[in-house]
């Protein structure tokens, strides 16, 4: 029973890359009967907004990714301070007073000497008097976590065995000069306190994992399992961004893309499963396994989502779209769903059947003759076949010469849903009037 978390910062809108991570966490929790936590990492007070937080909630709810509890880091600052004090007392956290310029200069010197550009731990040799003098001049310390000297290894559920040798990473900053906790500290404290047992995130976080495992152990806890998935790229293999096709989820919703089409695509891209429509999030969770996730970065093309959306709609039962089509019924949806790119397009076909249009009459005499042979109501799905057979026998017409002028007169279009399905919704009076060239 996995306890997972999705931890977006409410400093912008969710995009497809975010949602792919959220889906994996949600599916892992739901498949195991566990717990899925939505955690808003909102310690960046300058950039975090209530509007972005609400937008994240709305996007998650739209996609069907329900959460068992919601947490906000901004109300947990006392916990981070307690962890800082514990680490400082145990000797694993130490104050540093270097400026950014001084640190950058030291990195350049190390690189020039062929050494890894990591922090040299010079603050560990400073005396209390030296630190006091710096603080008297207005410098406030940031606090670094002292890494150990042993290899950190773990079993990644996607990447396999991973090991980090000591000396290749700087002692991370856990507390900034203004006293604010960094992501490294807050995330670890939260994972421990919330009982997170599985962390699923992008492979851009791999370098953080060894540090976080050491920090978790220093705080007296056991590390969770980890799964780092490859990041989405563009269709040509470049880095994904909003400018390069990494569209916001809200934009897809506004464009009429169905939530389950988006979820189906993002849950299966980059896996061994075919990208096929699913009609419930639970069905996606039931088929999810980390062993199916490829190590190769999946290529995301926005056109693929739109194509899958069309495929999803063509197989969608009416109950899957009914909330957005309150005036329609299952019979009409079944009649037109093969000719819609968005569910709302069904309303256009409904209006075409039930509201006045200007008929497109190409052969007036033929249309009048066809009108005279309309069967009496009530009509069912056989009326088109019965009617066109009678018109064909009377006029000697067949194929396109028979069907095309009738379709144009009745719909104003030369393609669309089967006329056999549409005709009963139009009714005899409307059909007769349109064949006679009248607006009806």
Image (tube, rainbow, N blue to C red):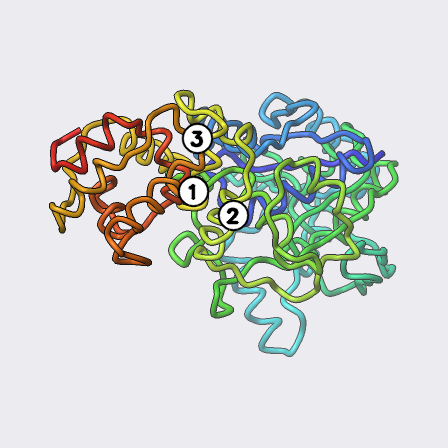
Residue in the image at 43% along x and 57% along y? 303
Residue with the mark numbered 1: 252
Helix, strand, or loop for circle 2?
helix
Residue 251 at least partly seen? no
Residue with the mark numbered 3: 380
Q: Earlier in the sequence, mark 1 or mark 2?
A: 2
Q: Position of residue 234 (x, y in %)?
A: 48, 63
Contact? badges 1 and 2 (CB < 8 Å): yes
- Spatial distance from mark 3 to mark 1, Cα to Cα? 38 Å
Q: Quadrant of residue 118?
A: bottom right
Badge number at residue 16: 2
Q: Earlier in the sequence, mark 2 or mark 3?
A: 2
What quarter of the picture does the C terminus occupy? top left
Q: Earlier in the sequence, mark 3 or mark 1?
A: 1
Between tags 3 and 1, which lies in front?
A: 3
- Spatial distance from mark 1 to mark 2, Cα to Cα? 10 Å
Q: Position of residue 119 (x, y in %)?
A: 66, 59
- Spatial distance from mark 2 to mark 3, Cα to Cα? 45 Å
Helix, strand, or loop for circle 1?
helix
Badge number at residue 19: none
How would you rate the neighbour count of disc 2 (Cα within 10 Å): few for under 14, some for 14-19, many for 20 or more? many
How would you rate the neighbour count of disc 1 (Cα within 10 Å): few for under 14, some for 14-19, many for 20 or more? some
Q: Position of residue 177 (x, y in %)?
A: 56, 39
Residue in the image at 55% along x and 70% along y? 108
Q: Considering only vertical position in the picture, is 33 above or below 291?
A: above
Between tags 2 and 3, which lies in front?
A: 3
Contact? badges 3 and 1 (CB < 8 Å): no
Count how many numbered circles sit on residues in the image: 3
């Amino acid at each position: 029973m996995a306890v997972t978390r999705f931890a977006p910062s409410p400093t912008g809108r969710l995009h497809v890359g975010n949602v792919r991570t959220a889906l994996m966490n949600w599916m892992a929790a739901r498949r195991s009967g566990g717990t899925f936590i939505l955690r808003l990492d909102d310690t960046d007070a300058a950039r975090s907004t209530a509007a972005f937080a609400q937008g994240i909630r709305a996007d998650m709810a739209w996609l069907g990714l329900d959460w068992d509890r919601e947490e906000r880091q901004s109300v947990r600052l006392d916990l981070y301070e307690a962890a800082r004090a514990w680490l400082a007392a145990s000797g694993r956290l130490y104050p540093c007073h270097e400026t950014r310029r001084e640190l950058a200069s030291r990195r350049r010197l190390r690189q020039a000497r062929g050494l890894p550009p990591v922090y040299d731990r010079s603050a560990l040799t400073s005396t209390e008097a030296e630190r006091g003098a710096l603080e008297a001049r207005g410098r406030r310390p940031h606090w670094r976590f002292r890494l150990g000297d042993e290899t950190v290894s773990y079993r990644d559920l996607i990447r396999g065995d991973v090991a980090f040798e000591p000396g290749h990473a700087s002692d991370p900053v856990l507390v900034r000069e203004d006293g604010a906790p960094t992501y490294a500290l807050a995330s670890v404290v939260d994972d421990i306190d919330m009982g997170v047992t599985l962390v699923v995130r992008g492979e851009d976080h791999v370098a953080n994992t060894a540090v976080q495992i050491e920090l978790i152990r220093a705080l007296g806890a056991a590390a969770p399992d980890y799964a780092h998935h490859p990041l989405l790229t563009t269709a040509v293999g470049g880095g994904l961004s909003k400018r390069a096709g990494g569209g916001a989820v809200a934009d897809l919703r506004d464009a009429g893309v169905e939530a389950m089409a988006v979820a189906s695509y993002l849950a299966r891209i980059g896996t061994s499963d075919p990208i096929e429509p699913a009609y419930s999030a639970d069905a996606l969770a039931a088929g999810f396994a980390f062993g199916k996730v490829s190590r190769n970065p999946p290529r995301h093309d926005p056109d693929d989502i739109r194509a899958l959306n069309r495929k999803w709609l063509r197989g969608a039962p009416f109950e899957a779209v009914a909330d957005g089509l309150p005036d329609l019924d299952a019979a009409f949806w079944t009649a037109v769903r093969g000719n819609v790119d968005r569910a709302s397009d069904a309303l256009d076909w409904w209006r075409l059947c039930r509201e006045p249009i200007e008929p497109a009459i190409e052969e007036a005499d033929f249309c009048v003759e066809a009108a005279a042979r309309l069967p009496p109501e009530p009509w069912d799905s056989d009326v088109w076949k019965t009617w066109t057979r009678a018109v064909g026998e009377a006029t000697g017409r067949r194929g396109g010469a028979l069907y095309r002028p009738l379709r144009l007169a009745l719909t104003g279009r030369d393609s669309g849903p089967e006329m056999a399905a549409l005709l009963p919704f139009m009714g005899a009076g409307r059909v007769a009037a349109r064949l006679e060239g009248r607006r009806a």
